[in-house]
Image (cartoon, helix red, strand yellow):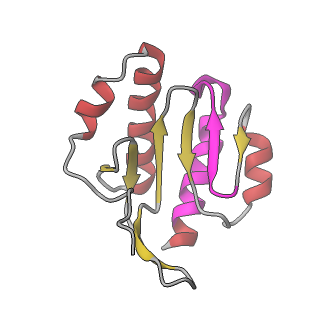
Amino acid sequence: MAKNKTTETLVDVNEYISNIDNEKKRTDGFALLDLFKSVTGLEPKMWGPTIIGYGKYHYKYESGHEGEAPLAGFAPRKDSLVIYIATEFEDRETLLSNLGKHKSSKSCLYVKRLEDLDLEVLRKIVHNSMTHSC
């Protein structure tokens, strides 16, 4: 069975964000770092080369593939900030409709700029996502 690419690493989260070339992505990365830490109460960990995750859970697919993943997290990517959330949680659709300018998939939110979001709604999304996953 193939080794999981997204595993917890020992890379320093602050150093990773400090080395982001784009100043706006770097600033947004530090803002998300603070937001997630205040909501989750957990220390951030690097997962793979680019994901900053909080907490972890074990998963196992019907295929037998299994591993660990962060309960919630984000990645300051070149094109957008990617925010990782649970696929289901309380008030999901209402919160997403009030979040602000974003695109979404099952477990990801794609945001160009943090200032496009209502950060209080994002806090509720992270909280509800973590509560549902725990």
Residue 2 magenta: no
Question: Where residue 14 appears, x then y in whole percent?
Answer: 26, 34
Please tell me which residue is depicted at 60% across the width and 44% down the height of the picture: 122
120 left or right, relative to 12: right
Q: Is residue 78 above or below residue 59?
A: above
Q: Position of residue 2 (x, y in %)?
A: 39, 69
Quadrant containing the N terminus in the rendered view: bottom left
In percent of the image, x 71 and y 35: which residue is there?
102
Query: Which one is nearer the viewer's eye here, 83 or 21?
Result: 21
Q: Residue 15: x percent and y percent? A: 23, 31
> Quick check: 26 above or below 84?
above
x and y percentages locating residue 116 in the rendered image: 67, 26
- Along the horizontal axis of the image, is 44 left or right of 115? left
Q: Is residue 109 inside the magenta stretch?
A: yes
Image position of 14 (left or right of 4):
left
- The overriding secondary structure of the stretch rendered in magenta is helix
Q: Could you say which is closer to the camera, residue 12 or residue 97?
A: 12
Please tell me how many numbered marks the rendered image carries: 0
Q: Which residues are magenta?
A: 106-130
Q: Could you say which is closer to the camera, residue 124 or residue 26?
A: 26
Determine the residue positioned at 43% across, 77% down.
Answer: 66
**Which quarter of the figure has residue 88?**
bottom right
| Nearest to the observer: residue 78 or residue 32 | 78
